[in-house]
Image (cartoon, rainbow, N blue to C red):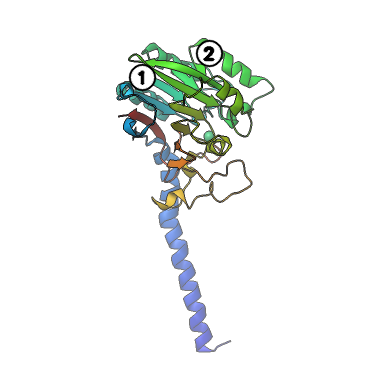
Amino acid sequence: MNNPEIKKKKNLLFETGRKLALTGTTFGFPTLAYARYVEPNWLDVSHQTVPVDALEGIGQGIKGFKAAFFSDLHLPDKGPASDTLWLAVERALLERPDLALLGGDMFDHGKYNPVMADMVRVLTGAGIPVWGVLGNHDYFGRRGEYLRIMKNLEEVGLKWLVNRAEPFEYRGAQIWLAGIDDFVKGEPDVAETARQIPPGVRPLILLSHNPATIKTLPPDFAHVMLCGHTHGGQINPALPPLNRKLNWVKFRPGSHHYSEFVLGWYTYNGIRLYVGRGLGMSGLKMRFNARPELVMLKFE
Ligand SMILES: [Fe+2]
């Protein structure tokens, strides 16, 4: 036991443990505080562009068309929305988009909170039409609550794209918008959505909450698809570009959160997919290396 070699090894082990504990205390608490109090309030207005020339069958007339994409607001059951959400609305207004799109998970537990209607009213009041789809969390409420959500928001001007396709006029050009219901909790009906689109027309923008939906679509179904759901990992240990690879959303096959499309741009089956990080949080109310994101999509 008194062997000096063993004693040396024990001391080394103790010293390493002490250093690790010290490092954890020094960096652990600030990191937790940052993830809890700083990053969730650190809005990223992310400007994304799509070259019109690369879109087959789309006229030059849509150059300049701009959409604001909000997803994963995760509003509480009652009470006000976070400052980040209101800041996103304010920043969207400043960008003067031609329309606003909601990518689902507006309500954290699927319980209608009238603050969502206030946000829609602010946008429509500024002359910005609002369209949306539901996310899995919007279905978490008591039986039929999602119908109340749909009715209440429709009353303040939100137009639903839940298995729907509709044209939108932009400077004399006709743009088709479409949406598919949530992949996990909804009743996604691609065929019904496709039935509403005239033959030969490819929607410019397709909305669906969960990026996994893209695998259920026929090739070239839409030009651009916008999704949320993954929160960019929400708590994501890896720095770019590895944050698209090393995060828990990507490593949980079998979970309904699992997605090989975690954040940013992808091309799949001829569809340009953008997965936004969303604005709110689910589960642990923290964000790390996945700042809340308001997506400003511009065709140019
Ligand atoms: Fe979400």
Residue underneath mark 1:
98
Name the foreground residue: 49 vs 32. Answer: 49
Q: Residue at x 60, y 49 (%)?
A: 253
Q: Which mark sits nearer the N-terminus, 2 or 1?
A: 1
Q: Is residue 8 above or below residue 158?
A: below
The answer to whether residue 26 is seen in the rendering is: yes
Q: Quadrant of residue 91?
A: top left
Q: Measure the alpha-carbon separation of dots 2 and 1.
A: 19 Å
Q: Secondary structure at mark 1?
A: loop
Would you say the beta carbon of the disc 1 residue lies within 8 angstroms of ligand 1?
Answer: no
Q: Amino acid at mark 2?
A: Glu
Q: Residue at x 50, y 16 (%)?
A: 159
- Name the image quarter holding the N terminus: bottom right
Instruction: Give residue 265's position: percent from left, percent from top.
Output: 41, 41
Q: Residue at x 64, y 46 (%)?
A: 254
Q: Amino acid at mark 1?
A: Asp
The answer to whether residue 264 is seen in the rendering is: no
Contact (Cβ within 8 Å) of mark 2 with mark 1: no
Residue underneath mark 2:
154
Q: Residues within 10 Å of mark 2 (few under 14, many from 20)?
A: some
Name the foreground residue: 174 vs 227. Answer: 174
Name the foreground residue: 179 vs 74. Answer: 179
Q: Residue furthest right?
A: 143
**Which-is-in-front pick, marks 2 and 1?**
1
- Name the image quarter holding the C terminus: top left
Instruction: Give residue 264's position: percent from left, percent from top.
Output: 42, 41
Q: Which mark is residue 251?
A: none
